[in-house]
Image: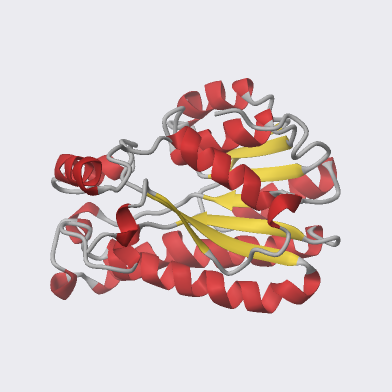
Amino acid sequence: MSIPSRLLSGKVGLVAGVANPHSIASGCATAFHAAGADLALTYLNEKAKPFVEPVAKNVNARLLLPVDVEKDGQLEAAFEKIQQTWGRLDFLLHSIAYCPKEDLHGRVTDCSRSGFSRAMDVSVHSFIRMARLAEPLMREGGCILTVSYYGAEKVVDHYNIMGPVKAALEGTVRYLAAELGPKGIRVNALSPGPLKTRAASGIDHFDNLIDEARVRSPARQLVSIDDVGAIAAGLVSALARNVTGNIAYVDAGHHVMS
């Protein structure tokens, strides 16, 4: 998909949560770069870094920063580095989610207190923290994006506790949009259809989700990380200057089906 090469020229963006070249965040980073943005990327830890470095190289990322949102100070240090490097931030993508395996694979009814707390902290509160840190860097406005899924709205088999967690994330998008809107900061969520990413592989019977999406989507096809990246680039650009508080479905129309 062709993206106008100067759509984001002169813009500075942060892409948080790149896991590997096949992740949603990677698709978005590629699109941002193609549109002319200057980027900072994050990786989880030293074990993950070799999988993220090729993405950073491909998008000419000026910064590649360690960010484990469960470790105190790492997120703050990343934003401080952005402040030192550019003195501002025009957009950010939050693509971070986690739930302990035993809670992800069990019933919502049986979710542990600790598992629910970790899932909410990593998947939702980290988004709030990023918005708070980004706010002073977006003095002339900006855009903040996160990544959700249709399981936030309707019950999806085997998505389990991540459904309520993503529902909380989408609610947070709306409240942040209302609070930050007067400062010219827009907040939106991307809601892609099922994609074969490392994160999605942790969901039980994920292949069934893929097959169902392919058969039942009005377009009769699956989406790609490039499709998601193209929408993300448009949302953080001036083309979407009055779009905020929205959930942008990128799922070949699957969400309209009963």
Image vertical order of residue 190 relative to residue 31, above or below? below
Q: Residue at x 61, y 73 (%)?
A: 176
Q: Residue at x 60, y 34 (%)?
A: 31
Q: Work out whether residue 43 can be spotted.
A: no
Residue 205: percent from the left, percent from the top? 13, 45
Looking at the rendered image, the quarter that the N terminus falls into is: top right
Count up the numbered dots: 0
Left or right: where does residue 27 sit relative to residue 22? right
Image vertical order of residue 236 relative to residue 106, above or below? above
Q: Residue at x 59, y 35 (%)?
A: 29
Coloring scheme of the render? secondary structure
When asked about the image quadrant of residue 175, the answer is bottom right
Left or right: where does residue 195 sit relative to residue 188? left
Looking at the rendered image, the quarter that the C terminus falls into is: bottom left
Residue 52: percent from the left, percent from the top? 51, 29
Left or right: where does residue 28 sit relative to residue 64? left
| Foreground of the two, 179 or 191 | 191
| Foreground of the two, 74 or 32 | 32
Residue 237: percent from the left, percent from the top? 71, 48
Residue 53: percent from the left, percent from the top? 55, 24
Left or right: where does residue 124 sit relative to residue 237? left
When asked about the image quadrant of residue 165, the answer is bottom left
Q: Work out whether residue 56 can be spotted.
A: yes
Q: Residue at x 26, y 74 (%)?
A: 113
| Foreground of the two, 208 or 136 | 208
Q: Residue furthest front?
A: 218
